Amino acid sequence: MSLSAELCRTMYKDMWRIRLFEEEANRQTNLGNVMGALHMYCGEEAVAVGVCSNLRKDDYVLGTHRSHGHCLAKGADSRQMMAELYGKATGTCAGKGGSMHIADFSLNMLGANGIVGAGIAPATGAALASKMRGTDQVAVCFFGDGAAARGTFHEGIGLGSLWKLPVVYVCENNQYQQWVPRMNVAVLDSVSDMAGAYAIPGVSVNGQDPIEVYEVAREAINRARSGGGPTLIEARTYRFYGHSLGDEQQYRTPEEVEAWRTDHDPIKTLRALMADRQWLTDQEDTAIQDEVKDEIANAVKFADESPFPDAAEVTTDVLAPAQEAG
Amino acid sequence: MMRTITFGEALREALHEEMERDDTVFVMGEDVITHGGPYKVTQGIAERFPGRIFETPIAEAGIVGVGVGAAMAGMHPVVEIMYLDFITCAMDEVVNQAAKMRYMTGGQASVPMVIRLPCGAGRLLAAQHSQIMESWFMHVPGVQVAVPSTPSDGKGLLKTAVRSPDPVLFFEYKRTYTSKGEVPEGEYTIPFGQADIKRDGEDATIVAVGPMVQKSLEAAVLLEDEGYDVEVVDPRTLSPLDTETICESVRRTGRAVVCGEDSSFAGSVSEIAAMIGENCFGDLKAPVVRIGSPHVPMPFSAALVKHVVPEVPNITAAVEQVIS
């Protein structure tokens, strides 16, 4: 799909879905309703939305510990996701996964992942399955800049390139590896420069600009789908919140964060583009935001009203049922 | 109809039959085409099933990780790790990925992957090519551990492993590859969690794992001369473990020796011994004796190895101890 008012509106709405879902999850964490750690994706919305807007429902996505955005952009139900964060039986993973492990196999969202860099080889495997079956499904793996230091990055991308698989590796370089500025612990500024080692195309893109991400991802996904093999995309981005909630963020200044929020908010960027092309009136903007607010309010209501899992669920889903019986 | 073939040949047959049966089954690993695998188990697959065997670079985490993803996407990978010791390079992929996916996703994910693991002593390859880690993986919920001891069990268990909807760690003791045994013609599988009584007896039970089954059978013959009638139970899979068959045997004989090549300290034999103690205490006429490797890395010299891997005299002595 080429750039159109309709596509931009969809992307704009999806970015709002991610932003408001997370801000609400943050609020519900403080109220004690959301359990466990929350790694906020806010600020990075253009990456998930720009990439996933090019995907079909049957394409595969694998994520990270910071994957609310990837799930929502792939089309996951915000009610089930919120219920998962609440630890409820109606959650995406029946309350067994939580924020870091949300998966929705009905959308071929094969899972967020609590281990840095651990999705790269499995995404390559999903792409191998697609190639062996002769379907034209593409696998997309999102991972952070920290993952580029792991051996799984080398091994996974190496195999994807060797077998020319339909996979796109998307590095979300948000410039901080947990609590450490990335360049304190890395020598190569641009992760996409590493693509040369695997003889695949590598491209860096402004991860705060959804249109730029969309276009770069479109080319990579089309190449993968048509048998051209993998691409490594580095999206230069920024997380508006700390590593996880409660992070004191001593590694950066409030001014730095404020500057990114003011000048590089992907939602503002897209809104400005749409306003410029007269694709979004103030009225339409308000309507979109109201619609998303309703969706998130519904998600909270659903999560609130859902039951917690039964104690018997502790021992289910370890193995497939037949073997549990055996 | 039976015929006599080696353990390695039996495994090869199982792979060929399963690949014939289901075209989502494929093989992946180091040297699996050019060399046919280190023990030739994957020989002939490339010719018969082109496009369904992948020879990889030396990248264990990548190989197992790719297997996890392919399995979640509906394929049935049979992955070979050249030596069990090298699975440590892919522990995250086994323990955090393959094993936990079904649970973490609330039952959405299935990871039907077999990881074949040539293992154990036998070729004097020393500490980094000879270890046994049965208990490491028994400890991980979400994976299954199979330890066949004979060609016919090897074939039947491998076919079950390939068909399992959940990951299987398939331990292949290196010195078993060339051992011969009767294998039925035609189609059969052996269910997981079903121990096999390899020899009936009344005076004591030896629960023997992997290559210790053969040694226990040899010990039983020697013990017969002493007037002892010993039963040998082969669990065949350690996870799931057929506690029922083991306990039934021990309750009947009242005496138990548990024997494996895994370290006896926190090893597979320890879990079995504890399980027997917990369930059969009232029927035991003597404390359960464990035989395993001492808590040391595998040495190199044959002069040292023979003091590490349990041998027939260790087993006969243990049986004498529980009977006397």
Image (cartoon, rainbow, N blue to C red):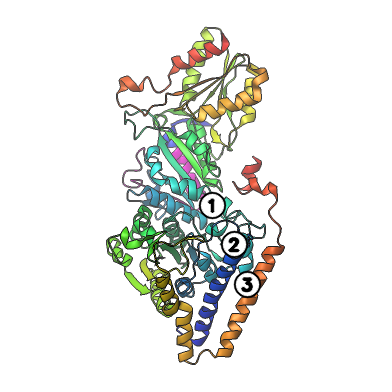
For the point 45% across and 17% down, the residue is B312
Q: CA distance from mark 1 to mark 3?
A: 28 Å
Q: CA distance from mark 2 to mark 3?
A: 15 Å
Percent position of residue A326, x then y = 64, 39
Q: Dot 3 lies on which element?
A: helix
Q: Are marks 2 and 3 in contact (CB under 8 Å)?
A: no
Percent position of residue A251, x then y = 39, 62
- Front disc: 1 or 3: 3
Q: Which residue is mark 3?
A: A296
Looking at the rendered structure, which numbered label has been put on residue A29?
2
Q: Is residue B4 above or below residue B251?
A: below
Q: Which residue is mark 1?
A: B101
Three-letter code for the amino acid on which mark 3 is drawn: Ile
Q: CA distance from mark 2 to mark 1?
A: 25 Å
Q: Dot 1 lies on which element?
A: helix
Q: Dot 2 lies on which element?
A: helix
Percent position of residue A299, x then y = 65, 69
Q: Chain of mark 1?
A: B
Residue A326 visible somewhere in the drawing:
yes
Question: B14 or B291, which lies in front?
Answer: B291
Percent position of residue A324, x then y = 63, 43
Q: Which residues are magenta?
A: B11-40
Q: Is residue A189 magenta?
A: no
Three-letter code for the amino acid on which mark 2 is drawn: Thr
